[in-house]
Amino acid sequence: MIQPAEKLEYRVIVDLVPRGASVLDLGCGDGELMDLLATRKSANVKGIEIDEQAIYRCVARGLSVFHGDLDTGLVDFGDRSFDFVILDQTLQQLERPDEVLADALRVGKKVIVGFPNFAHYSARLQMLFRGRSPVTPFLPYQWHDTPNLRFFSAHDFVDYCRNKNIRIEKAVHLTATKVVRILPNLTSQVAIFLIAR
C-alpha cells in the first residue's frame, strides 16, 4: 500500500502498472518512482537518466539505471521490449519530444506520460494580470532557470495523440491533493496519460 505522504502522481502511475510488469523509466531522476514500482508491484524496472548525481542515488537504492541522453534515442532497446515505458515530468524538458515519444511507443507496449499542465488557471491568471511567466508550486522556476523547454497543456497532448494516431487508454488529471474531473485542462496541475499504438 502506498503511503499518504507519497506523491499522488506516483500513486496514479503505480496503479496503472500491473504486478510483475517490465518497466523502463525515461528520465528516472533519483529512482523514487522506480523503487515504488519494484517494491509495490514487483515490477522489473530499469531507468535512463542524464544527471550523474541522480544516477548515484538510484544505484544507492539498488536500482538498474543507464546514463543517457533521451534526445539521442533508444537505439539500445528492441521493439516492444518493455510492458511499460514511463515519461513522467520528462517530455516537456526534451529538445525532440516527438522523436522520443515515438521511440518510447516503439520500445514499450504501453507508455505512461505525466507532465505539468501549463494551462492551469493559476498560470493563466499570472500571465493575464501580472504579464509575467507563471511561477506556481508545480512550475516553481523563473523563466531563466526552468528545465522546461516545452509549454503545453492537456488539450495540446490530446490533439497531438489524435494527429499521430496514438490511442489514449486513460487520462488522469491531478492537483497536488486530488483527482480533478471538471474542466481538467483548466483545473489540473498535472496530467497523466496511458497511451499505446
Image (tube, rainbow, N blue to C red):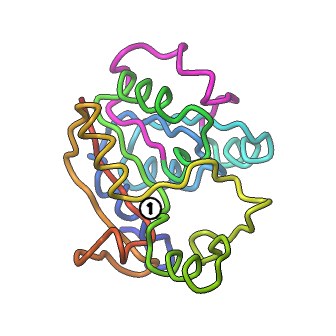
Q: Nearer the viewer, residue 52 or 59?
A: 52
> Which residue: 44% across, 42% down?
86
Quadrant hosting residue 129: bottom right
Circle 1 is placed at which residue position? Answer: 10
Where is residue 116 drawn, in percent x and y? 49, 62
Where is residue 135 drawn, in percent x and y? 65, 75
Where is residue 134 drawn, in percent x and y? 62, 73
Above or below: residue 46 compared with residue 135: above
Q: Quadrant of the N terminus?
A: bottom left
Residue closest to the far bottom? 129
Decide if residue 188 is on the left or right side of residue 135: left
Quadrant hosting residue 160: top left
Above or below: residue 29 compared with residue 11: above
> Which residue: 22% across, 53% down?
170
SS state under label 1: helix
Highlighted range, magenta? 64-87
